């Protein structure tokens, strides 16, 4: 039971760190444009160069 004295505050602290990280990501705009990032990942920036058979 003595280990709970360490584990409970540790779990609460890690949960708080995770919550603060999530709130920071919301505040910094990480989730503003969810679809744009997906389309940029699959969109071709440059047309593919054609190779000529020699």
Image (spheres, rainbow, N blue to C red):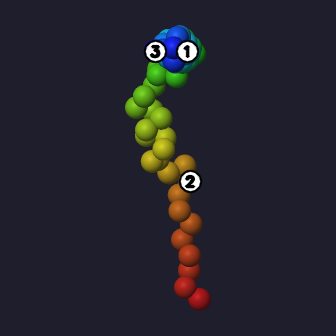
Q: Residues within 10 Å of mark 2 (few under 14, many from 20)?
A: few
Dot 2 or dot 3, earlier in sequence: 3
- Which residue sits at x=51%, y=14%? 2
Mark 1 highlights which residue? 6
Dot 1 or dot 3, earlier in sequence: 3
Residue furthest left as drawn: 35
Question: Where, by quadrant of the figure, is residue 13 drawn?
Answer: top right
Q: Do the CB atoms of the residues marked 1 and 3 lie less than 8 Å apart?
A: no
Please give the name of the residue rendered at 56% of the width and 76% of the height, measured from the top-left corner: 51
Measure the alpha-carbon separation of dots 2 and 3: 62 Å
What is the spatial separation of the Cα atoms under label 1 and label 3, in whole angstroms?
10 Å
Whichever of callouts 2 and 1 sits on the residue coming sooner in the sequence is 1
Secondary structure under tag 2 reads loop
Alpha-carbon span between mark 2 and mark 1: 55 Å
Residue at 56% in and 53% down: 46
- Mark 2 sits on what residue? 46
Mark 1 against mark 3, which lies toward the viewer?
Answer: 3
Asked if residue 19 shows in the view, the reply is no
Q: Residue at x 59, y 89 (%)?
A: 54
- In the rendered image, the residue lying farthest to the bottom is 54
Q: Residues within 10 Å of mark 1 (few under 14, many from 20)?
A: few
């Amino acid at each position: 039971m003595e280990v709970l004295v360490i584990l409970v505050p540790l779990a609460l602290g890690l949960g708080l760190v995770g919550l603060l990280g999530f709130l920071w990501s919301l505040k910094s705009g990480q989730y503003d444009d969810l679809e744009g990032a997906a389309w940029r990942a699959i969109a071709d920036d440059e047309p593919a160069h054609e190779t000529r058979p020699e």
